[in-house]
Image: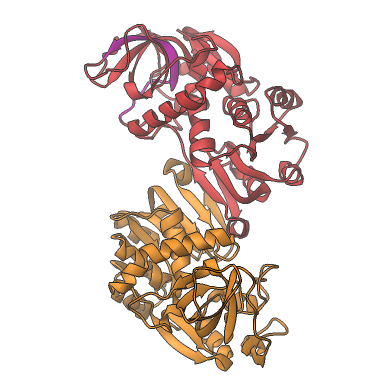
Chain colours: A red, B orange
């Protein structure tokens, strides 16, 4: 089969399409014949050598795929060959076939194409884990999410609106702000022109912040959280260090939670997959939420996909088509 | 009745014992005839004008008392005149009588004197809320608590040991370290001589940190937390601002939670009081946990009590006896 390989960290051109052995499923795994694979920012960091894969992971890039079940390990009972699915991989999604723990596989949702379902696992599971499971966003509360046009941002806006929350989003251009508003955000702030914290504060504050920025955004995040506000941190695109004033943290009873999806235990991933199929798939079937695909690339054009990801000009998700 | 009053912020000598009107209970309140009142650090901050009482609070000092029910409001059903109780007040505990929401009152526990029960509400409810309810310390996990000899520290050490946790405590003198060890701490670190973070790290790390320090302790706190560690912050005696490196927060899936007891809703305080009576009172009855009283003062010597609190030389709790 063909898969994207790399022999050293570096720019997009280290990504090479090569013939590699077919994967064999372990007892609790399935092999998926890939229809599409999502490109995510951690893939770029891993390519650059800044985000090493866990020791037990497939060292290949690619954290999410859609496709059909191609083979099942001896202990797998829930899946049949041919089932249309999408899945969180433990690496190796940039390939024609990938093996995945059976608990990290989800039935492809009704309402969108199987190809587009590849855009769901990373962002939907990340948003579910952080905004819903950990930060417990409730109907009627207000979510602030940065990066309105990113995969995470575009997903969080739609899922929070589907939940009945008010959504405030930020972006760094008027075009991306318009994109966020079109997805349903009640208020979108261009952070290149305006101070988001004061605008969110004037709007009444946020109950939950989904933040992939940290750094220069942190003071504003903490300032605009309401009493009992929850900050779910998933990346630090604006710097990994920031001074924190703990007076508002104490006085407002704030909670700051960091997490990433990849190091979760398989049981935890399986529980998240169950929750997402139960709560989010109906929103997709009802047309309340759909992933937004900006562009697709052939597998051998993975380098071009990474160039797009790094350019920051895309809106929504980028997919590889093996 | 007699109560401690103050007409302006300042040193201990602004505390004056005066005749004031007897309190009358509102419909959901009781009046307690005070046997003893705890002195707490927030009282000193309030005296200095640095921690203003909430708008709806009794402006008098004193956040916890023990005594007997003296009168019940018209809606109060759970308490009878004469019941021995201890309670979290909404201010005004430095007095012969104080009115308190009926939900903030607890039956005085078996196993200790009614006088000593005045030392329980602030510290036990704070430790319960932070270490048990919010940070979910489990049997077999490790708690790190600073200030081994403080009211909070001495309480947290004993409650965590009673829960079956390993306890590491810090203090700033050999005498206070010995005190912490005597209370059951498995390891006590003199932070004047040693770097607590590296020692806790070598001991395997902490699942939960109960921190009243922040500031210069924050980097060490985050460094020595294990994966999925929880930091419960209740004060900032080492500075209210600190640089935070969010890489470990993300990689270790850390949670940082701030809170203080005073602004909680009455329903929340009542729920905490119920939990403490159910879980902590049996530890007291069994002799597993007892408050440590360093010194008592007559009500009119409140200024001396505050001098002791500010000297930092005491170990355990200080009480006023009206």
The residue drawn where x is 42% and y is 76% is B108
Q: Quadrant of residue B49?
A: bottom right
Look at the picture and state if A125 lies above or below B59: above
Q: Is residue B267 shown left or right of residue B285?
A: right
Percent x, y of residue A9: 44, 25
* Nearer to the camera, A9 or A270: A270
On the rendered structure, is B322 left or right of A270?
A: right
Residue A222 highlighted magenta (yes or no):
no
Say if A192 sits above or below B10 in the image: above
**B35 horizontally vs A80: left or right:** right
Q: Nearer the viewer, residue A70 or A194?
A: A70
Which one is in front, A171 or A47? A171
Asked if residue B69 shows in the view, the reply is: yes
Q: Which image quadrant for residue B189?
A: bottom left
Q: Does any portion of residue B222 appear in the rendered image?
A: no
Range of the magenta residues?
A56-72
Q: Position of residue B186 (x, y in %)?
A: 28, 66
Q: Position of residue A118 (x, y in %)?
A: 48, 16
- The x, y position of residue B117, in whole percent, is 43, 78
- Residue A307 falls left or right of residue B119: right
């Amino acid at each position: 089969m063909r898969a994207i390989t790399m022999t050293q960290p570096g720019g997009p051109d280290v990504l090479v399409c090569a013939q590699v052995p077919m994967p064999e499923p372990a007892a609790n795994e399935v092999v998926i014949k890939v229809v599409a694979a999502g490109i995510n920012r951690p893939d770029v960091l891993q390519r650059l050598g800044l985000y090493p894969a866990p020791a037990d992971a497939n060292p290949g890039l690619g954290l999410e795929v859609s496709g059909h079940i191609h083979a099942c390990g001896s202990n797998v009972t829930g899946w049949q060959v041919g089932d249309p699915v999408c899945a969180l991989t433990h690496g190796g999604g940039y390939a024609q076939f990938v093996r995945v723990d059976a608990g990290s596989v989800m039935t492809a949702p009704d309402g969108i194409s199987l190809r587009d379902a590849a855009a769901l696992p990373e962002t939907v599971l990340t948003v579910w884990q952080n905004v819903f499971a950990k930060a417990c966003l409730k109907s009627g509360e207000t979510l602030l999410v940065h990066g309105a046009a990113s995969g995470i941002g575009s997903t969080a806006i739609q899922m929070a609106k589907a939940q009945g929350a008010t959504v405030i989003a930020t972006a760094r251009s008027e075009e991306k702000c318009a994109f966020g508003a079109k997805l349903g955000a009640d208020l979108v702030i261009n952070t290149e022109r305006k101070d988001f914290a004061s605008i969110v504060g004037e709007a009444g504050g946020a109950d939950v912040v989904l933040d992939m920025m940290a750094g220069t955004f942190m003071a504003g995040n903490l300032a605009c959280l309401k009493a009992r506000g929850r900050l779910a941190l998933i990346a630090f695109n604006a710097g990994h260090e920031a001074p924190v004033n703990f007076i508002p943290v104490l006085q407002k009873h704030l909670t700051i939670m960091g997490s990433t999806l990849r190091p979760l235990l398989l049981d935890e991933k399986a529980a998240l997959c169950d929750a997402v199929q139960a709560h989010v798939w109906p929103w997709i079937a009802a047309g309340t939420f759909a992933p937004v695909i900006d562009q697709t690339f052939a597998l051998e054009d993975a380098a071009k996909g990474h160039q797009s990801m790094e350019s920051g000009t895309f809106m929504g998700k980028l997919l590889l088509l093996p």
